[in-house]
Amino acid sequence: MSFVLDNSVSMRWLFRDGKPQDIDYADGVLEGMKDISAIVPAIWGLEAANVIARAGANNLVTQLHIQAFLKLVGSINIEADTDTFAYALTDTLQLARRYRLTAYDASYLELALRLGLPLATLDENLQKAADEAGVEKFV
């Protein structure tokens, strides 16, 4: 079984910041990926690259940490959804408006709904929307 991986979880693998329970959750998701694959909207790589670039420019993360993160991401099974664009101005837009999410966050919710998969997220607004939409949380 697969699940949808939100960037809020994967960035914990890089920064190791946040509440202890958030770090534990992110580590649990990573551990679970030994047996299953994660599916991400097509924007995931750009979103991750943006966070990494900004953090690097602000000296919030070292090049060594970035390289370790990229090696980690390259070693796990993350599949990008090739249909994200096709739903951007329809279902994703509707979800963003209905749940007051960014279009980026709504793309994770749309993907989880479309594929009937649980969602791994640490974003409170996205989790609330997922709960309201009937999407299970990946545990």
Image: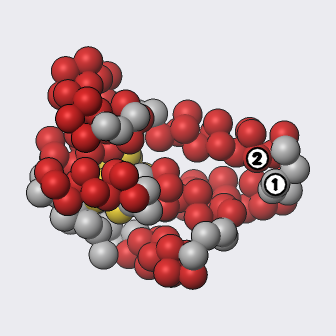
Task: Name the spot of residue 54 as percent of width and height, x first.
Answer: 74, 39
Task: Name the spot of residue 135 as percent of width and height, x first.
Answer: 17, 57
Q: Residue at x 81, y 56 (%)?
A: 61
User: How far apart in space, not on screen, are marks 1 and 2 (Cα)?
Assistant: 5 Å
Determine which quarter of the picture holds residue 103.
Answer: top left
Q: Residue at x 84, y 44 (%)?
A: 58
Relative to 43, say whether 113 is above or below.
below
Circle nearer the N terminus (1, 2): 2
Q: Secondary structure at mark 1?
A: loop
Q: Is residue 27 left or right of residue 95?
A: right
Relative to 66, say whether 137 is above or below.
below
Q: Is residue 128 left or right of residue 16?
A: left
**Residue identified by numbered label 1:** 60
**Residue identified by numbered label 2:** 55
Res. 81 visible in picture:
no
Q: Answer few, some or many: residues within 10 Å of disc 2's Cα (few below 14, many 20 plus, some between 14 and 19).
A: some
The amino acid pointed to by label 1 is: Leu
Relative to 82, say whether 121 is above or below.
below
Q: Answer few, some or many: residues within 10 Å of disc 1's Cα (few below 14, many 20 plus, some between 14 and 19).
A: few
Relative to 110, say whether 21 is above or below.
below
* Image quarter in which the N terminus is found: bottom left
Q: Is residue 118 left or right of residue 44?
A: left
Q: Residue at x 16, y 46 (%)?
A: 113
Determine which quarter of the picture holds residue 93.
Answer: top left
Q: Which residue is at the front of the view, 33 or 61? A: 61
Q: Secondary structure at mark 2?
A: helix
The amino acid pointed to by label 2 is: Ala
Task: Name the spot of residue 75 as percent of width and height, x first.
Answer: 55, 61
Q: Which residue is at the front of the view, 74 or 135? A: 135
Q: Are marks 1 and 2 in contact (CB under 8 Å)?
A: yes
